[in-house]
């Protein structure tokens, strides 16, 4: 994992409080990413792949005439594996 994995970009803060807050957010993001990698290690699914898989999961609304309904995307096998690994940990 590298700085580019966090998709970091230059931030120009002037106040010490804002600089500290920004660094804290970056550190927490890195911590979450590393812990997620550790939890998912037995599945051999990378963090990037996990983000791609889980990014496709969602909920939407379908409107056909006067009928309005909410639909959920189905979980594929990899998404189920990721959820089981994270929730079971």
Image (cartoon, rainbow, N blue to C red):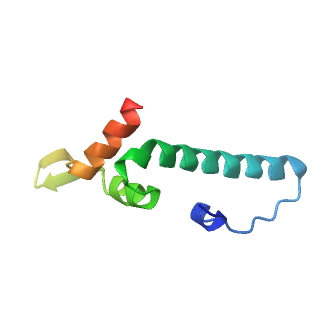
Residue 67 makes an appearance in the image:
yes
Q: How many marks?
A: 0
Locate residue 67, reporting x and y percent.
Answer: 11, 48
Is 45 left or right of 77, judged from the image as shown? right
Q: Position of residue 86 (x, y in %)?
A: 40, 38
**Placement of the C terminus among the 4 image quadrants:** top left
**Does residue 38 appear to the left or right of 68 in the view shown?**
right
**Residue 59: in sight, yes or no?**
no
Which of the two residues, 23 or 87, is positioned nearer the viewer here? 87
Q: Residue at x 16, y 54 (%)?
A: 63
Rendered image quadrant of residue 31: top right
Horizontal side of 26 relative to 33 (left or right) equals right
Residue farthest top in this picture: 88
Residue drawn at x 31%, y 37% as measured from the top left: 84
Report the quarter where the N terminus lies.
Answer: bottom right
Query: Foreground: 24 or 2?
Result: 2
Q: Nearer the viewer, residue 23 or 77?
A: 77
Question: Percent position (x, y) of residue 41?
Answer: 43, 48
The image shows residue 61 at horizontal and vertical percentages of: 23, 50
Look at 74% across and 68% down and name the residue there: 10
């Amino acid at each position: 994992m590298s700085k580019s994995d966090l998709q970091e970009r230059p931030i120009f803060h002037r106040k010490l409080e804002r600089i500290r807050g920004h660094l804290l957010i970056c550190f927490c993001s890195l911590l979450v990413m590393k812990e997620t990698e550790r939890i998912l290690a037995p599945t051999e699914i990378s963090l990037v792949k996990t983000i791609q898989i889980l990014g496709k999961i969602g909920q939407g609304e379908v409107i056909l005439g006067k009928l309005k309904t909410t639909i959920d995307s189905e979980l594929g096998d990899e998404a189920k594996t990721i959820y089981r690994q994270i929730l079971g940990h």
